[in-house]
Amino acid sequence: MKFGVSTFITDQGISPTSLGTAVEERAFDSLFIAEHSHIPADRQTPYPGGGELPEMYYRTLDPFVALTAVGVVTERLLLATGIALIPHRDPIITAKEVASLDLISGGRVIFGVGVGWNREEMRNHGADPSTRGRLTDERLRAIRELWTEEKAEFHGEFVNFDPVYAWPKPVQRPHPPIYVGGGEGAFRRVAQLGDAWLAISMPPQELGPQIERLRALADREVPVTVYAVPADPEQIEGYSRLGVERLLFYVPTMPERETLEYLDQLAEVAARYS
């Protein structure tokens, strides 16, 4: 089982370069970073975690700028969005950003995607929250066309373009793996468009039946990465018995010294299972 780190990179915490170096030095295989373009001042959508929206949501760096900085100072670390908010993103620009990062990093990108939860944020990007699922599916299909076809063309309900040339193409073939985030509502998207499921944190006893339902729907062995798991040996053993591919420890957004100390603690836990 592999271990990675998930976090929010902001202007108030450890820098992307220091974080990336530290994560790789401690033998984690991946770094997943969150995305929010902005937070509307008049937000009405409740925060899924309950209570007040934490400050890091307001201050996230652009994920592809941050991951490029991480990629430059690392050699092996997988560079992942966890998650990129597809209803907010132009598919042509996004395809180029992901492919460019994959090229610069030597094929180390994981494209973690999701539909998001903040309805006001979506609306500011011109997305209708009621159709964000269909919009996400269509944009992902268009992105795959741009990555894999010399002359890409797409005509759909939301995305429409005649044949275009779009380079660079990703280093990874046929394209960087797409990790679909979400709960059971995302299972059809995982089955049809995803290479893996990026599961919301839940205990192994709840995750096991969901994995079975997903694999039955997809009719294949879908790899599973679990977001924000506790550093609890009993739960880690439970995930291992389920055949989970990767666990992501969540690292709060903190200054450099505190972050490095916390990473040391997590690395000690992960080393027991290497």
Image: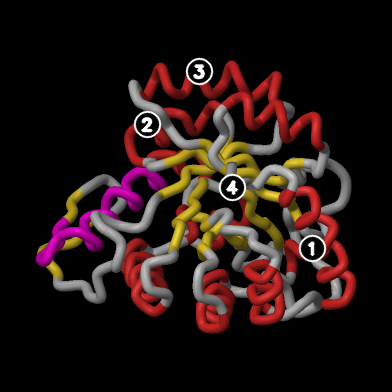
Q: Is residue 52 left or right of residue 161?
A: right
Is disc 2 surrounded by few (<14), some (14 to 19) or many (20+) residues within 10 Å? many
Position of residue 170 relative to residue 192, above or below, is below
Identify the element where label 1 is drawn: helix
Identify the element where label 2 is drawn: helix
Instruction: State whether the magenta stretch is mostly helix, strand or loop.
Output: helix
Residue 165 located within the stretch drawn in magenta: no
Asked if the residue at tag 1 contacts the one at tag 3, i.e. Cβ–Cβ closer than 8 Å, the answer is no
Nearer to me, 211 or 231: 231
Q: Which residue is mark 3?
A: 212
Magenta part of the chain: 135-153
Q: Which residue is mark 2?
A: 191
Mark 2: amino acid: Ala
Residue 145 located within the stretch drawn in magenta: yes
Which residue lies at the image location 39% right of the left edge and 20% below the top edge? Answer: 217
What mark, if any, has residue 120 been given in the picture? none
Mark 4: amino acid: Lys
Q: Is residue 106 left or right of residue 214?
A: left
First of labels 4, 2 by sequence position: 4
Q: Which residue is mark 4?
A: 2
Mark 3: amino acid: Glu
First of labels 2, 1 by sequence position: 2
First of labels 4, 3 by sequence position: 4
Mark 1: amino acid: Leu
Q: Which residue is mark 1?
A: 263
Mark nearer the viewer, 2 or 1: 1
Asked if the residue at tag 3 contacts the one at tag 4, i.e. Cβ–Cβ closer than 8 Å, the answer is no
Q: CA distance from mark 2 to mark 3?
A: 13 Å
Q: Is residue 203 left or right of residue 34?
A: right
Identify the element where label 4 is drawn: strand
